[in-house]
Amino acid sequence: MTEKIEQKSAWQEWKSAHAGLWQFVMFVLMSGITTLVDLATFAVFNFWIFRSLHDTPFFWGPIRYSVENGGLTAFGAFAVSFAVSQTVNFFLQRKKTFHATNNAVSSALLYALMVIGVYFLQLYVPTLIRAPIVAVIGAVIGDLLVKAINMILSMLIQFPLNKWVIMRQRDSDDK
């Protein structure tokens, strides 16, 4: 029993000594859960619910989903899966990763602004890369690869913004 307490103590010491690294590890782990939600939602909408819209192009400003880019099927699946996964991600990251104590409403508003920016980026990126990727490796694997690229871009934007701007721990002076 004493050995277990010493191990736990050593683990706690390591986490304290490497707090930033541990927070990033937790971010990645919680993002893994979000990724599963995102991929499942994407698959359901892309390969089943919106499948009949594949031959319908969707154009809105710079967001251009031609039939070659997956049409309204791809746009709808990317859009819905991102919205669902980011809602789940907010709650997971706020409490499990960042242990945020700042105002939840202002945190949610800032998170929403960040997500809207990332959302449009993720809707635009597939219009640039999907057709060439699908031409080389096929639609199913290509769509999943495009989705993975979008997720990596999202993580590179979200971690620093969440850590230093959106999901902070309130200073003792702020209380």
Image (tube, helix red, strand yellow):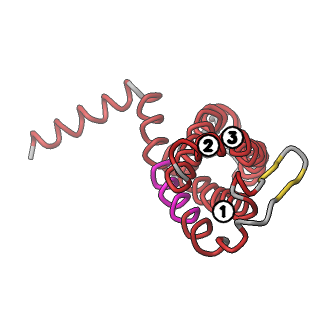
What is the number of the mark on residue 150? 2
Tell me which residue sits at (78%, 50%) in the image: 109
Q: Quadrant of the C terminus?
A: top right
Residue 57 placement, left or right of 28:
right
Residue 27 at x, y = what percent?
49, 41
Residue 33 placement, left or right of 174:
left
* 171, above or below 127, in the image: above
- When asked about the image quadrant of residue 71, the answer is bottom right
Tell me which residue sits at (63%, 61%) in the image: 81
| Secondary structure of the residue carrying numbered label 1 | helix
Observer-nearest of 26 and 59: 59
Query: Are discs 2 and 1 less than 8 Å apart at CB?
Result: no
Residue 87 at x, y = what percent?
64, 59
Foreground mark, 3 or 2? 2
Observer-nearest of 150 and 13: 150
What is the number of the mark on residue 166? 3
- When asked about the image quadrant of residue 102, the answer is top right
Q: Earlier in the sequence, mark 3 or mark 2?
A: 2
